[in-house]
Image (spheres, rainbow, N blue to C red):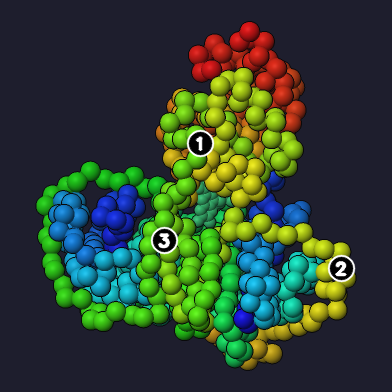
Amino acid sequence: MKIFTCIKYVPDTSEAEIKLNPEGTEVDSSRFSFDINDADNYAVEESVLIKEKYGGNVTVVSIGPKESDVMIRMAMAKGCDNAIRIEDERIASHDPLMVARVLAGAIKDQEFDLVLTGCMANDYGQATTGVALAEILGVPHAAYVKKVEIEDGKVKAYRELEGGLMEVVEINLPAVLTIQTGINEPRYAPIRGIRQAQKKELKVVNLDDLGIAEGDVNAEASQITLEKLYIPVVESKAEIIEGEPEEKAEKLASILVKGGLV
Amino acid sequence: MGNVLVLAEHRRGELRDITFEMLSLAPSLAKDLGGEVMVLLLGNDLDQMAEKIAGYGVKVLVVDDPLFADYNSDKYQKVISALIDDYKPKLVMLGQTAQGVDLAPALAVEKKLPFVADVVGLEVEDGVLKATRQLYSGKVNAQIAFKPADTYLVTIREAAFEAPEPAAAGTIEKLDSPLKEDLDYRKFVEYIEAEVGDVDITQSEILVGIGRGLKEDKNLPIAEELAEVIKADLCGSRAACDAGWLPSDRQVGTSGKTVKPKLYLCMGISGAFQHVAGIKGAKTIVAINKDPNAPIFAEADYAIIDDLHKVVPKLTEKLKELKG
Ligand SMILES: Cc1cc2nc3c(=O)[nH]c(=O)nc-3n(C[C@H](O)[C@H](O)[C@H](O)COP(=O)(O)OP(=O)(O)OC[C@H]3O[C@@H](n4cnc5c(N)ncnc54)[C@H](O)[C@@H]3O)c2cc1C
Ligand SMILES: Nc1ncnc2c1ncn2[C@@H]1O[C@H](COP(=O)(O)O)[C@@H](O)[C@H]1O
């Protein structure tokens, strides 16, 4: 099995306020810690599990800055074999179709059986890149995959639908699967793996190295324009319970009891 | 002509809500674009569904063929692609659902359509189509303009728009399937029902919900002890279930359960729309989260902005006292 696994370095914005630049075109992400996108972490684990079962090789592909090398090394510490990091300012990164073209450019000339992506990146939340990538590569796909079984050149993909219902589809290899969280239990990198990862190959390339024309993936090539970002006004009807933690607890307890809610 | 083509979504003989939600958006867009609304209904054995959709005053295009007895993205793509060529709609609309995300991006690539996914707002401004979508789990909005093209493609977020009431009688037109033969590279095998657990949280009166903010499974007793005192069942966000803190049948949200308790008290849950979609039926919502900007507060009736570790044990203690 020759596997390519696409991973993205994303900011953890779950606990913090987000600030925009004055022009309202970019998020000020300087205060955030970055790490591998949630679903991609599961995709890494799944690719390593498949390799452990069927043999083969896992190549990590990521478009991102130098700082993301830490994330890529971590994926290699968990068992991925080598990596390609694409760094190029010219890519229209707000458009997942352009991102997919670049990823395809890094993969298309090599042999592959499977490409795994996360089902959705938590920063932009588009859930688009993987299926677009499949179409560009000209191979079948399945999105939102929560279980994978491989036999006889085919993959049985268990797709998660709404309400927890699963749809099982059988597709021919090579194929692209977009991996849903919860498909496995991502491992911790073993110390030995962390040491070995330093010696594995991490190629850093740009569009020219990949033979991708700038005009195919830049802001002009994109058919959409990001006009502005803004912080939405959240209308909350909530009664905010104030005070020290203990007071808040007391106030809430009495609201619940007096209101007959408990 | 600026027609709007909406793909009706259905599963196992039932139209899904997103179909009608899209019909709340489509008419005004069709008007602004100078065309009409057409709904594509693709599948097998569709008469009843076609009638129902026509009741919304739209033109229903029906492709009814055993080839489409089960959803298959590749076959669907072939049909939609052919109909785009035939009908040249200005705008094509799908749901951002497990079906739509499996289909729309490939269609966009194939037909070279400008595409925006997971749209929560869509309008025509000075002749330019503009979409609003959310970034960073709802903490930032983005306005995106489409560059001029013959056909635009969007997927619409579920439950972001309210379905309209049925209006006038529309029309139904049956079409021959543009696809004549089955495809062999992707086959539907079967559906597998969600697991049934020990507690059916869709029936619970009181629910305590936990999220990633709980941090580790060794903190579970914080929630369990509270639940015990107020006789609640435990449930959680996807993150809590993925982490293995709770079995997956306790997951609340679009890919989990839709709950309707009298009281939903949640801690360490950010309130992603996929989660919130599952708690719309809760009567009273209490949220405890240390981030004042957490989207969950938009849903809450009572909000505590604080560290759950400091507040919840005290809350449990107090409730124990009050309830004797
Ligand atoms: C196709 C698809 C389907 C999905 N379906 C579902 C679904 O059905 N249900 C669902 O829930 N999600 C679903 N998700 C995932 C969803 O997008 C979110 O990732 C998930 O809901 C986040 O869970 P969370 O709120 O627990 O974690 P986070 O978003 O990480 O939030 C953790 C919160 O805890 C708070 N916190 C941290 N520490 C503390 C503390 N000490 N005290 C108080 N607060 C604290 C933080 O401020 C933060 O708001 C789905 C995603 C996809 C792509
Ligand atoms: N910059 C990137 N580098 C590598 N993979 C990416 C990148 N952006 C998106 N992906 C992959 O595409 C998936 C879905 O992303 P999205 O369509 O943006 O929600 C992610 O989970 C990644 O696997």
Considering depth in this image, is B44 or A83 the residue closer to the camera? B44
Image coords of residue A119 (percent x, y):
54, 63
Q: Is residue A50 left or right of residue A130?
A: right
Cα gap from disc 3 to disc 1, whole angstroms? 24 Å
Question: Upstream in the sequence, badge 2 or badge 3?
Answer: 3
Q: Which chain letter goes with mark 2?
A: A
The dot on residue B198 is: 1
Q: Amino acid at mark 3?
A: Glu
What residue appears at the point 44 percent right and 75 percent down from the top-left corner?
A171
- Whether marks 2 and 1 lie on the same chain: no
Confirm or reject: label 3 Cβ below 8 Å from ligand 1: no
- For mark 3, what is the residue? A167
Considering depth in this image, is A88 or A220 the residue closer to the camera? A88
How dense is the environment of label 2, judged by Cα within 10 Å: few (below 14), some, or many (20 and up)? few
The quadrant in which residue A208 appears is bottom right
- For mark 2, what is the residue? A192
Q: Amino acid at mark 2?
A: Arg
Q: Which chain letter goes with mark 1?
A: B
Q: Amino acid at mark 1?
A: Asp
Local secondary structure at mark 1: loop
Q: Is residue A254 above or below residue B220?
A: above
What residue appears at the point 57 percent right and 82 percent down from the top-left corner?
A113
Marks counted in the figure total: 3
Cα gap from disc 2 to disc 3, whole angstroms? 39 Å
Image coords of residue B186 (percent x, y):
40, 75
Q: Which chain letter goes with mark 3?
A: A
Local secondary structure at mark 3: strand
